[in-house]
Amino acid sequence: MFTVAIIGRPNVGKSTLFNRLCGRRLAIVHDMPGVTRDRREGKASLADLVFRVVDTAGLEEAGPEVLEGRMRQQTDRALSEAHVALMLIDSRAGVTPLDAHFAEILRKAPIPVILVANKCEGGAGKPGFYESYGMGLGDPVPLSAEHGEGLSLLYEALMPIYDAHMAQEAKDEADAVRAAFLETEAASAAKPYIDFASLEPDEVPEDDDSDPSQDPDDDFSVEAFDPRGERPIQMAIIGRPNTGKSTLINRLIGDDRLVTGPEAGVTRDAIEVDWEWGGRRFRLVDTAGLRRKARVENSLEKLMVADTLNAIRLAEVCVLMLDANMVMDRQDLTIARLVIDEGRALVIAVNKWDACVDRKASLQRLADRLETSLAQVRGVPFVTLSALEGHGLNRLMDAALEAHAKWNRRVPTSRFNRWLKGMIDRHPLPMGKHGRRLRIRYGTQAKIRPPTFALFMTRPDDLPESYVRYLNSGLREDFDMAGTPIRLLFRATKNPYADK
């Protein structure tokens, strides 16, 4: 797909332009310079041009031993994979020495570079816009990413490059089809010629691969498929800062796709990475670490927290990363409860297991905290692993797939009502507030993801919470839904004698 990389020094509006082209607020935008650290990809459109756009960190000169150097490596990779680069400058600040330095580097790049003078709204940006002509990157495009001005000029600059790329893609595809056709023709010519007209009926060779009982035009011979199975599983990696979330994703996909390091809080944006494992497609989401609410001070961190919470809401499976030497503290429990309240499937990953000081004590502490503090979802799966060394990753993915399957489980209505009758016979419903026994008439599963059951009964407001927990535990045990959030909705049945 045609790819556009947005590059430039920090705080020139790259993320703002990224969001404008994508039509959604995907990347975090803040006045603080250097907010973006990982390269973020999104599907963008500009009039009739549809392409992939990549937001990058600011261009800075630094070595790989520091965070800025690792950010620069991600920018260089985005530049190497793109078909065109948009170099942004802040027209209000004019052409800085750093802009001129990187312009000299980009003039030698193997891909076209379009110079974009951002923040050109009003008259304050005109001096910087005219100054940018001397950068040697061609005519600059005046733009205001925040207000959406100048996008038509950007379209005119992109269109010739886009058309040339699409024409080359069409030519390459036609050449591939022609090569395959010629290969098929050559294979057919190598087969021995058989004169079918001269053969007796018993001598006509049969095609062993054909099945005369199957009609190729019969629609019922097509195997049915589940459309949900074609969609990637959205799996968010969450946890406190510096628990190895980005390292885990890099190890799973086998590539240094995300910026990592010993510094806490490296990740800021929620970055999505498409990946396939065991024949299933996944969309891995790396998130910023969630600290205690009292420690979230500045507005940037509040935006990071909001981005992480949104990733949890959109996820299907959440992997909660724990540090093996600090297992399940109060903040970990808060995050786990947040996942359960959102109704997402939860898997706990105990990371840095190779560096754990006391493994037996860590496992015992984890089991105790799950038993006492997460009793409402008893049976949450947990896996020990080392993201840095790559140990335990297959066990993690098996647990994630199993949790996802339970999260999608559906119970037939007849079977559910037989189970419900057995539960009520074992422990009858208590008396209501008015001295009459409560009665559940029937129930059904209203939805999946998470499993949600609707039960119709008399006076649902009188049902004690203890009986709700009794039904919830029975469902989890009898229908193999351990660790899955289950929702029970109690609805009042209409009294047929009320209007008489």
Image (cartoon, rainbow, N blue to C red):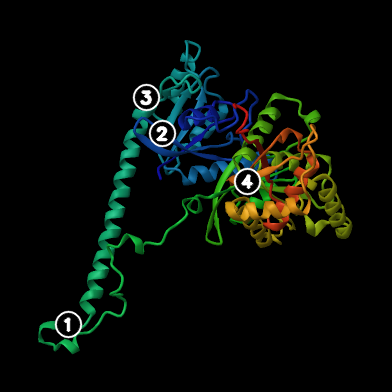
Q: CA distance from mark 1 to mark 4?
A: 69 Å
Q: Name the residue that disc number 4 marks.
A: 443
Tell me which residue sits at (37%, 61%) in the image.
222
Tally the numbered discs.
Answer: 4
Kind of residue indicated by mark 2: Ser
Kind of residue indicated by mark 4: Gly
Residue 248: x and y in percent read 67, 52
Assess whether mark 1 and mark 2 are in contact (beta carbons under 8 angstroms): no
Badge 3 marks a residue whose secondary structure is helix
The residue lying toward the viewer, choosing from 175 and 356, is 356
Badge 1 marks a residue whose secondary structure is loop
Left or right, residue 351 beside residue 221:
right
Badge 2 marks a residue whose secondary structure is strand
The residue lying toward the viewer, choosing from 384 and 189, is 384
Residue 153 is tagged as: 3
* Quarter where residue 136 is shown: top left
Residue 45 is tagged as: 2
* Quarter where residue 465 is shown: top right
Q: CA distance from mark 2 to mark 4?
A: 47 Å
Q: Name the residue that disc number 1 marks.
A: 193
